[in-house]
Structure formats: structure tokens, C-alpha cells
Amino acid sequence: MNDLNIPGSQSTPQINSDGSQGLLTMQGDSYPENSFEFFGPVIAWIETYLRDSQAPLRLELRLVYMNTSSVKAMMDIFDLLEEAHGRGRQVSVDWFYDPRNERVLDLADEFREDCTFPFLIAPDSPFK
Amino acid sequence: MNMPLLAPSEQELLRQVETLLAQERYQEHPLRDALARLFEYSEGQRERLERLIKISDGYHSISRSHSQTLAEQYDRQLRRLEKLARISDRYQNSLRELSEALKDAALRDPLTGLGNRRFLMERIKEETERANRKQAAYSLGILDVDHFKAINDQFGHETGDKVLCEIGLAIQDALREYDLCGRWGGEEFLIMLPETPVEFARQVAERVCQGIKEVRVALHQEGCTPPISASLGLTQYRFGESFSEALNRADTALLQAKAAGRDRLEVA
């Protein structure tokens, strides 16, 4: 399975996946011109991983600003996780935010609303 | 015989006919053959009818569950859409607040909290238009803290910054509510007095200078700084001229005040 190594840019988050660890990380701002195109490979990676492996999947997020279509893409991703969780798969999300920007906490909380899988929202350690 | 859809009286009739047909003594009866065929025909029709009902019920239930699924899907999509809008609105709000904060930061001097040069320029432009429209001139003053470099050199930048903040407060205190002040640059401040002839402006400006001299006392008590004073150049806007002409005149007056020994006010 091919891992994702998408470098970040001013308008797109950095995205890395590690299938062997069952880890997907995304960090930065997200307002790509074409969110569907941008998040397509990410959604495909998650679908493939959930289909081909039985191991747990953890998402580590440090997302700051998102445009509406990125918000939609994230909701689709969380739906995938929710579905897998319903089938008994071990999935989780850890969303870290800059403690100087508490607004992200509220936003992450909105995302978490309908999710029944483990969804942690925590301030990022300043020493990271 | 399975007849779940028939009423008891109908079931009884069918059983009766069946029993009659089975009886030995009617085997040769002239009507028996016709009755047997009629019975068979009726049974065939009944089965067809039952099959028809079953199929029709099946379709009905399929379409019912289909429309239920659609309604559920619709509700789900609606909830998703509402959530999307909610999250998106939040992002938009935080961006708006950020842009307001940036705008504020762009117009404010971070040290003294007063308006910065950009802010002052905007306001002077506005006030110039208003002065011409209403034929009511404003007065403009530029003031420079005397020997500020010496304060910085002798007591350090921290004390220098503190002096500037105190001076900012003193100027604000001395001005009237509708007057305007800001940090023009380094140790220069600008005051603008809307709809004020220079004779009146002079009184306010003298109060400003006096206020600045009192800053010295407050700081001196902490054993920090030498006497503080300022030189001030004041002018009145002349109708029709550009605001930069008024600014230049105030600047020239300030230079005169400095040349004449500082700690004074010159009007041009």
C-alpha cells in the first residue's frame, strides 16, 4: 500500500500516512482550490487501509483554518471512520490545537459531535 | 386446502362442495361433472387472486421502505449540511475577527496604544475634506520629545519606552474629547484639533506641553529620569491647501521651536 507524503503549502495541509503504523497525520491550513481533488487520495488511502488491513487506524490532526469544502471532506473522512467503528474496527482521532488559538478547540468539538469512536481534542505541547 | 383470505362462510361453502363431490352416491349424478369443473375453476381463480394480492402487497412494501430510506437519507444529508454550515460559519467568524484585529494592529502603535502614522494620515485626509466642506479649519500640531535620545542612552530603552507611554497618556489627558492624537514616529507625536482656530488650539497645545512636563515628576519620583519636556509646532489648516502643506508648516514650526531652545511652542 502506497503511503501519502503530501508536502504542505500555504493553502494546503501537510499530509503523511504510515500504513505500517496505522497513522495518518494532517497539519496546517486547508483551503485548496479543488478540495475534492486534493482530499481524493486521502479518502482513497483511508478506504484502502480500512479494507485491506484489520489493524487500528489513528488520525493525528493539527488543522487550523479550513474552507467549507475542506470541512466537508473532513466530515466525509469522519463518516468513513464512524462506519468502520460500527463494523468493530479500532479507529481514533487525536486533534491537537495551539493553546493560543482556543477557537480550534470549539471547531474540533463541532466535528466530534456525531462521532462515537474515540476522538481526543487536546492542546499541543509547546515543546513539540 | 389453504384458504387464509376467505371468510368462514366462504370456507364452509368450499368444504361443502368438496364433500359432496367426494361422495360415492353422486358419482353418476348429471350435475357432478359440471360442479367439479366449476369448483376447479373457482379454486384456480382464487389462487390467482391470492398471488396477485401477494405481489401487489410486495410492491407496496418495497416502495414504502424505499421512501422511508429516502426520508432518512434526506434527514441525514440535512443534518450534515447544517453541521457543515455551522462549522464553516465558525471559521468565517474567526477569520473576520482576525481581520479586524489585524486592521486594528495596522492602525495602532503597539507601544503606546495610540493611533499610528497610517491612522493619523487617514484621519487628517478625512478631516481636510470635512474642513473644506464645512468651512471650519482644524489645527494641527507635531511635537517632539526633547533630548529623548539622551534618556534612551542614559536609562535604557525600557525607560525610554515607559516615558513614551506616559507622554501618550499625558497628551490624551490634556486634549479635549474630540481631539485626536497619535504617534507620528519615533519620539514624535501628532495632535489634531477639529474645527479649532489656532488661537484656541494654542491653549490646548500649551496644556499638552504642561502635561508632558508633569510626566517628569511621576517618573522622577521613581528615581529614573531627568526632566522631560517637548517642543511643539502648531498650525491651522488653510482652506484649499493639501493636508501635506499643513503638515509641512507644523513641521517647520516644530524646527523653529527646537532651534529656539526647545521646551516651547511655535505657531506657523
Image (spheres, grey):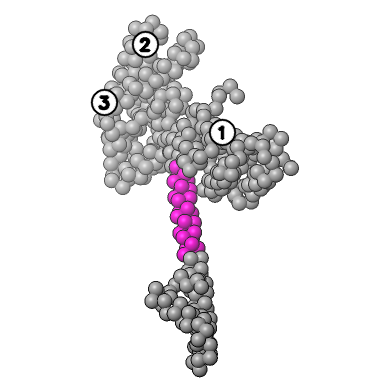
Residue pictured at 28% horizontal, 46% vertical: B134
Q: Which residue has dot 3 on it?
A: B203
- Tag 3: Cα neighbours inside 10 Å, few (<14), some, or many (≥20)? few
> Which residue is more in the foreground, B100 or B39?
B39
* Residue B1 to residue A106: above or below: below
Which mark, residue A94? 1
Seen in the image, is B28 located left or right of residue B268? right
Q: Residue furthest bottom?
A: B30
- Tag 2: Cα neighbours inside 10 Å, few (<14), some, or many (≥20)? some
Residue pictured at 29% horizontal, 27% vertical: B175
- Please say whether residue B87 is one of the residues in the magenta stretch: yes
Label 3 residue SS: helix
Front disc: 2 or 3:
2
- Please say whether residue A93 is one of the residues in the magenta stretch: no
Label 2 residue SS: helix
> Which residue is more in the foreground, A80 or B89?
A80
Residue bounds of the magenta highlight: B64-91
* Residue A110 to residue B199: above or below: below
C-alpha distance separating marks 2 and 3? 25 Å
Q: Earlier in the sequence, mark 2 or mark 3?
A: 3
Q: Residue furthest top?
A: B223
Which mark, residue B219? 2
